[in-house]
Amino acid sequence: MIQSIHPLIITIGILFVVVNTAALLIWLERRLLALWQDRYGPNRVGPFGLLQVLADMIKIFTKEDWVPPFADKPVFILAPAVIVVAVLMSFAVIPFSPDIWVVDLNIGLLFFLAMSSMGVYSVVLAGWASNNKYSLLGGMRAAAQMLSYEVFMGLSLMGVVMMAGSFNLREIVETQKGMWFFIPQIFGLVVFMVAGIAETHRLPFDLPEAESELVAGYHSEYSGMKFGMFFVGEYLGVTLISAFITTLFFGGWLGPSFLPPIVWFILKTFVFICFFILLRASLPRPRYDQLMAYGWKVMLPLALANLIVTGGIILAIG
Amino acid sequence: MTVVFWISAAVTVISTVMVITRRNVVHALLYLIVSLLAMAVIFFSLGAPFVAALEVIVYAGAIMVLFIFVVMMLNLGARASQQERQWLKPRMMIGPAILAAILMIELGYAIFAGGGIEIITGEPVGAKQVGMSLFETYLLGVELASILLLAGLVGAYHLGRRDRSEEEES
Amino acid sequence: MAAVSMEHGLILAGVLFALGLIGVLVRRNIIFMLMSIEVMLNASGLAFVVAGSNWGTADGQVMFIFILTMAAAEVAVGLALVLQLYRRFKTLDVDAASKMRG
Amino acid sequence: MLELLWLIPILPFIGFLVLVLIGTRLSRAGVAAIGVGSIGISAVVSLLCGFSFMSSPPPGDAFSQTLWTWMKVGSFAPGITFHLDALSLLMTLVVTVVGFLIHLYSTEYMNDEDGYSRFFAYMNLFVGSMLTLILADNLILLYLGWEGVGLCSYLLIGFWYKDPANGLAARKAFTITRVGDTAMALGLFLLFAHLRTLNIHGDGGILALAMSQWMEGSGLAIAAAALLLGGALGKSGQLPLQTWLPDAMAGPTPVSALIHAATMVTAGVYLIARTYVLFELAPAVQFAVALIGTITLFVAGCSALTQRDMKRILAYSTISQIGYMFLALGVGAWSAAMFHFMTHAFFKALLFLGAGVVILALHHEQDIFNMGGLRRALPLTSKTFIIGAAALAGFPFITAGFYSKDLILWKVWSAHQPWLYIVGLGGALLTALYSFRLVFIAFFGEAKSHVVKKPGACMKIPLTILAALAIIGGLIELPHAWGNWQPFSKFMESAFPLTASVEHGGHGKAAAELILQGIAVVVSVVGISLAYLFFLRKQIFVEGVAGSSVGVAVHRFWFAGWGFDWLYDKVFVQPVVWAARINKNDIIDFIYRLFAGIIQIFHFIFCLTQTGRVRWYAVGIAFGAVVIVAMVVLS
């Protein structure tokens, strides 16, 4: 009985933890940004302002869930669900520790890429369905940006795949016992991080929702929990990318044995989440054409060069 | 796996029917995406996980986004749907449906005339095998495909460019 | 486990192909025609994969990858043509572009 | 030093390649530097080779250098081999030095023209091909150079291709020389078929083999010599293939100077001199060479007397002077022919360059009757031009032309050909007449047009150098009667080892030679005086003669170059055109037209299916698929 229930427990547990982490990140980001910008941030509700999350949630759940009359209703409702579903699906293939995972897929990495490419639809459809020119522009930008950065997100990971000889994430982690991949695959890491920021459209690559130009872009017309899903989806994306950086480049659950593997995993992921927030605090937003040029003219050649060199070295050694 | 196959087959067929009958382009595209995703599940159930992933990444994730991108660029609104209503009359379906029905009957005859039913075991054929096959047996095909992609790239760039005279007008 | 056979897969592919064919013939909007063509391509890909997994070889998947490549190139060029068509005729009606008749 | 031989032809080719590949991106100065520089270095190398060759002659008085084997087909393996002996050394020196001077001149002459780099590219290609022709060790490589210069001639005659007339002239030159080249190719086939080699020199070369295998006057020797002569006639503009040369003046003037006066047109002379053994074995052909030369020199001289276009006068005079060379070759005076070739290269290049200055100065005016009085406006040019004309006319004692022409006439006389000698003498009179007709009309008298452009240094330097050469060039060979100073003949004879030793005028003949010289002096001076009288003092007399009914007819006849163009048009061109016209609707065409008609009918039927409606096409495809699948299923 316990055997058949075990996967279900793990699945529900992971879902719970991940969603709550995303919610907590709202608070964490505000606190950290405040810290770096030399102010207090939310500190009134509860200890260290921790209950602020709860307050926000109550507020967002009780708001009127309004659909504009000019919008394309089914698509408008579908759009925010897509991103949350796509990101949560990706968590399924992550091995959190040697014995905590949802599914051990032998094309795990490809599954992640497939899901992240599904995430595009959320933004694009939201932009289109809102029937609003700013939203449409934001949606188009998002489509072009995410399509472009997906290309070398995939390419940057192929170096890791080559070294591990597998798409299976568990095997990738296992092969990092000797050396974490961020040393040989430093360029792959850089490209993956940049692409990850662009995929989650976090600052500085938040062109699709640039408030100053596009009035929040694709989610201008959204309110209530639908907006909340975009919001949570973004934090889930940050968590997902951080978890993948940990898994692919920093040895996943591996670490000295004085801490259990799951703790190592969470610690590493947390570091990268903070890094993402730090980026938001420190970098300005580029122009749209700069973003695209940077992607195609710098990142893509870098990813290709990394791939060729990695392949050459593997051939030479093996 | 059998159940998975039949469910996703049903989803595929229904959503494909929706694709060819919708009036709104974006809705049709969404149904097409659903159809492709279901197709990916079929591939997975048939023991082709690598291709299933590619189907999602490339077909659903890239090609369809291109479609949506173009639809957004053209910004087809309610007027386009109205026009579709005009164009898409049920009686126009009759001829093509008959043609397709004949084709189906022929294909069905050809498929089942072979005799015994072969059962697909669904033993997975992994990415490694596909890759080895691609770069050993079908290397020439890979090269040709890359040339085709290059040609497509150049052609699309050339076609998509605005004429100089048009630019002056606008 | 026993019920999926090659014939079933092929019939599914045939049905999808026929649906795509109907779509191409019925639709006047060029974007819908392109989508229907995608359906047809996908159906033929399915047939290859079915056959490939029936014999447990990678060949079917390789052929599907080729079809995928072709579809990508076709869509790129096709959509560029759609844009040109829309610029020239301000409509997506394929019959508007019938000047190349003999 | 002689090891550098390969550089001589290679350098112009390199210049050509550079100019062709990146010429349009270079500045004019850069183009000129490459174009002139490559020829200049080539000239320096050939001078060094020449000094080395003369100071320490290589064994056998010849030097060969094989770069690589060109091709290998059975026993036929011609090499890219260069051969230097006295004959080719002389040609090389003249081509590179005169070529260099003309290139230098061109930098200024072509300065206002489009296609600057194209011009120098062609010129460099020409020089390279010409040097290949000269230095070739086998006839096939020689033929390569031969066709190369033909190509460059075509390209440069039609250099100003925007005027269709120039293109037509280029085509005419190409077609007519092709007639000769065909004969030459046949000659090469004949030689290879019988001697199994095309190498010229050495024990296994065609000269030695022909000498040992063929009887004098045998049919094979006559055929081979006659066929080679055909090629030489075409290239050198001799009767009956001379008609292209006057029209070739459509090209820029430096081109005329380089190709159609100084170098390429003498390739025929060179070919005959190179294969002299064949001609000695075929006395009939050799006499034909002399005869053709004589007739040509007279015919062309008459034509030159009536021309109005400055360059056409010079063109006819070129034909006439090459006629002298052929005459010399025909009587076996090889070195006399080469001597006249050398002096002719100097003074004819000088005359053309001078004419170029005049043409440029008068804004592309070429009619001499619109000139006049240029002596004052262009002092240096007119001085050098007069020197050139004097050399051409054989002005006694001080000009190179006198010595070389006198040598030829003396050789003709001593070969016992009095009739040829008399015609040659008449030709000399004509030469003096027409050359000073040109001088007096163009440079003396009243000015009829305004000089708009004075020559610069790049034009003056070549003129001056060539004028000096036109004077001192003759001094390397004095008549026998004047003492034993004949280094040129001695040097040249090393290149003709197989010939029966050329008869030197013995001491007993000194008196006869002096008398003949006296006649030549008188003819030349009389000619010049008559020209002075007719064309400067008493023009009425000339107009009277030319105005009479006979005079008009003769003038028109001569002006048209003795009607050869008309004749060829009637005899060759029109019958072919006529045959083509009546054959236009023949039965074979009908069959093809039937096919075309059937296809056209199908075309119209299928056109109806091309509705422009994509979906109907799709229906067609689907229907076809249904039918084909049905056929497969039901079969």
Image (cartoon, coloured by chain):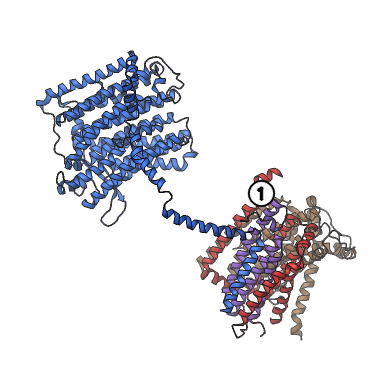
Chain colours: A brown, B red, C purple, D blue
Q: Which residue is painted at 21% across and 48% down in the image?
A: D205
Q: Residue D617: where, in percent of width, then height?
A: 63, 63
Q: Is residue A271 above or below residue C56?
A: above
Q: Residue C74: where, in percent of width, then height?
A: 62, 61
Chain ID at mark 1: B
Q: Which residue is painted at 77% across and 55% down in the image?
A: A136
| Quadrant of the drawing holding the N terminus of chain C | bottom right
Q: Is residue A122 above or below residue D421?
A: below
Callout 1: SS:
loop
Quadrant in the rendering for residue A129: bottom right
Q: Which one is in front, B46 or C90?
A: C90
- Crowding near the residue tagged with mark 1, few <14, some 14–19, many ≥20 C-alpha atoms within 10 Å: few
Residue D456 visible in rendering: yes
Q: Residue C33: where, in percent of width, then height?
A: 69, 63
Q: Is residue D142 above or below residue B48?
A: above
Q: Is residue A103 above or below residue A203?
A: below
Direction from residue B47 to residue A71 in the image, left or right: right
Direction from residue D494 to residue B137 in the image, left or right: right
Q: Which one is in front, D601 or D405?
A: D601
Q: Residue B87: where, in percent of width, then height?
A: 75, 62
| Quadrant of the drawing holding the C terminus of chain C | bottom right
The residue carrying mark 1 is: B162
Q: Residue furthest top?
A: D537
| Amino acid type of the residue that numbered disc 1 sits on in the rendered structure | Arg
Circle count: 1
Q: Which residue is painted at 45% across and 57% down in the image?
A: D591
Residue A180 visible in rendering: no
